[in-house]
């Protein structure tokens, strides 16, 4: 068999594995609702631009998928991911945007009260800055694991309702002083992002839900070409029990051995890149616990799935440092340790959004 036949066979195997996965997956309960919200979101953000081209839209995936062991699921295989990476990255994707809104206001005021303020200079400066931040701003589809970290809510304690609020003597509810800043940020920034149509949050739990939703999202994302970005930080199950092989009822504890056969999840990153949204800018993540193999594995994923970049991270240092692996670069990105509240996602998003800009200008140059 020659090499081309070999790769055709592999593609056919992958295609049939993908088909088998989706054919046997339990249908998404709120499929139509998701499609409707998504289309509305993408339409809104595709139109809203000063040059008529539309905003960049990123799908951030966050948290871990579960692999159920029973159809009426009581037990499942899970992984450690907290969703911190996805939630934090989303905030930094917006940071540019909040600045943009601020500058828009400045622009508007400059226009109205140009003479009273600093005249045309003020207006022109605002306009130039606006254009810059419009370029950097993203609308975000946040595909997240139910119960994982949420954008703008990272500083809240584990049990926010009970820990952040207290009853006064008159039985009114008030925010505890210690949490007033965190609560204000969570409410104001989160609602501002959602209400202005710039943040769409879609929750998943199982690997079946996650992959069906990713496929649904990629359809309208395909239409916006290189302005679409996938930032795939979710920890996706490598193995699962196909729905048709799964027992219906709770597995009984009588036997000494739990005999469950898990099979590999089809490699959807290839399908996303090749078929679902071939022009989108695609970033995947690679996590390892052994730093000696991390960069080779990341490089392998970059080539195998034809990603534009793979972010390599090691479990114990993942909040301090990551390495962005591209076809011709390995860039170490670190949190600014001199600032207590800096996150590694701050320089990471800056770098990736610059790379995305270069890609939009010339998609062929970057692959
Ligand atoms: O969710 P979190 O902040 O606790 O961890 C983030 C992460 C390590 C899951 C992410 O950076 C990552 O590497 N995701 C891909 C994991 C993988 O499948 O290799």
Image: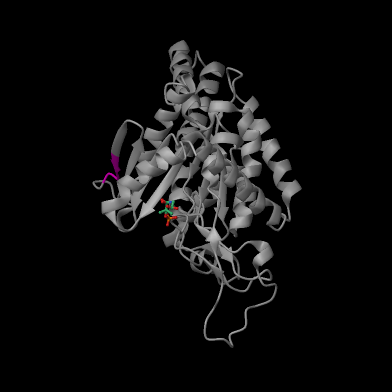
Q: How is the image coloured?
A: one colour
In the rendered image, residue 36, in percent from the top left (x then y), is placed at 73, 41
Q: Which residues are magenta?
A: 332-336
Q: Is residue 53 above or below residue 91?
A: above
Q: Which residue is at the front of the view, 191 or 251?
A: 251
In the rendered image, residue 3, in percent from the top left (x then y), is placed at 47, 36
Q: Residue at x 41, y 39 (%)?
A: 302
Q: Which residue is at the front of the view, 303 or 13?
A: 13
Quadrant in the picture for residue 254:
bottom right
List the single residue furthest toward the front. 1
Q: Is residue 260 magenta?
A: no
The secondary structure that most of the magenta stretch takes on is: strand
Question: In this image, 83 relative to 321: left or right?
Answer: right
- Check the picture and name the quadrant holding the C terminus: top left
Q: Residue at x 46, y 14 (%)?
A: 124
Quadrant in the picture for residue 207:
bottom right
List the single residue furthest toward the right. 32
Q: Is residue 289 above or below residue 342?
A: below
Q: Is residue 282 above or below residue 22?
A: above
Does the image show residue 229?
Answer: yes
Does the image show residue 196?
Answer: no
Question: In this image, 281 relative to 246: left or right?
Answer: left
In the rendered image, residue 221, in percent from the top left (x then y), is placed at 61, 34
Question: In this image, 358 relative to 262: left or right?
Answer: left
Q: Which residue is at the front of the view, 165 or 334?
A: 334
List the single residue furthest toward the left. 338
In the rendered image, residue 278, in percent from the top left (x then y), is placed at 56, 31
């Amino acid at each position: 068999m020659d090499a081309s036949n070999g790769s055709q066979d592999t593609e056919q195997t992958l295609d049939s594995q993908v088909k088998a996965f989706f054919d046997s997956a339990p249908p998404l309960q709120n499929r139509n609702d998701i499609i409707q919200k998504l289309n509305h979101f993408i339409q809104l953000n595709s139109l809203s631009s000063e040059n008529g081209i539309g905003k960049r839209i990123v799908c951030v995936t966050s948290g871990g998928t579960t692999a159920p062991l029973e159809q009426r699921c009581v037990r499942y295989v899970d992984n450690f991911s907290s969703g911190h990476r996805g939630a934090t990255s989303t905030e930094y994707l917006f940071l540019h945007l909040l600045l943009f809104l601020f500058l828009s206001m400045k622009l508007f005021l400059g226009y109205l009260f140009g003479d009273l303020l600093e005249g045309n200079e003020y207006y022109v400066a605002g306009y130039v800055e606006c254009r810059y931040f419009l370029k950097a701003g993203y609308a975000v589809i946040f595909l997240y694991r139910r119960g994982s970290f949420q954008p703008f809510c990272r500083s809240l304690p584990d049990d926010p309702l009970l820990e952040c609020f207290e009853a006064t003597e008159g039985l009114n509810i008030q925010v505890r002083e210690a949490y007033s800043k965190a609560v204000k940020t969570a409410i104001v920034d989160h609602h501002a992002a959602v209400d202005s149509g710039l943040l769409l949050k879609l929750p998943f739990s199982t690997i079946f839900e996650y992959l069906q939703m990713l496929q649904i999202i990629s359809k309208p994302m395909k239409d916006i070409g290189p302005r679409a970005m996938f930032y795939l930080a979710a920890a996706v199950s490598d193995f699962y029990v196909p729905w048709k092989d799964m027992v219906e009822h709770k597995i009984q504890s009588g036997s000494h051995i739990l005999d469950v056969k898990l099979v590999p999840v089809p490699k959807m990153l290839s399908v996303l890149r090749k078929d679902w949204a071939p022009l989108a800018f695609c970033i995947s993540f690679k996590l390892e616990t052994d730093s000696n193999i991390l960069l080779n594995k990341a490089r392998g994923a970059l080539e195998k799935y034809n990603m534009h970049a793979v972010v390599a991270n090691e479990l114990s240092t993942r909040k301090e440092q990551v390495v962005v692996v591209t076809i011709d670069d390995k860039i170490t990105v670190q949190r600014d340790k001199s600032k207590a509240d800096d996150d590694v996602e701050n320089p990471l998003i800056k770098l990736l959004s610059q790379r995305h800009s270069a890609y939009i200008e010339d998609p062929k140059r970057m692959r």
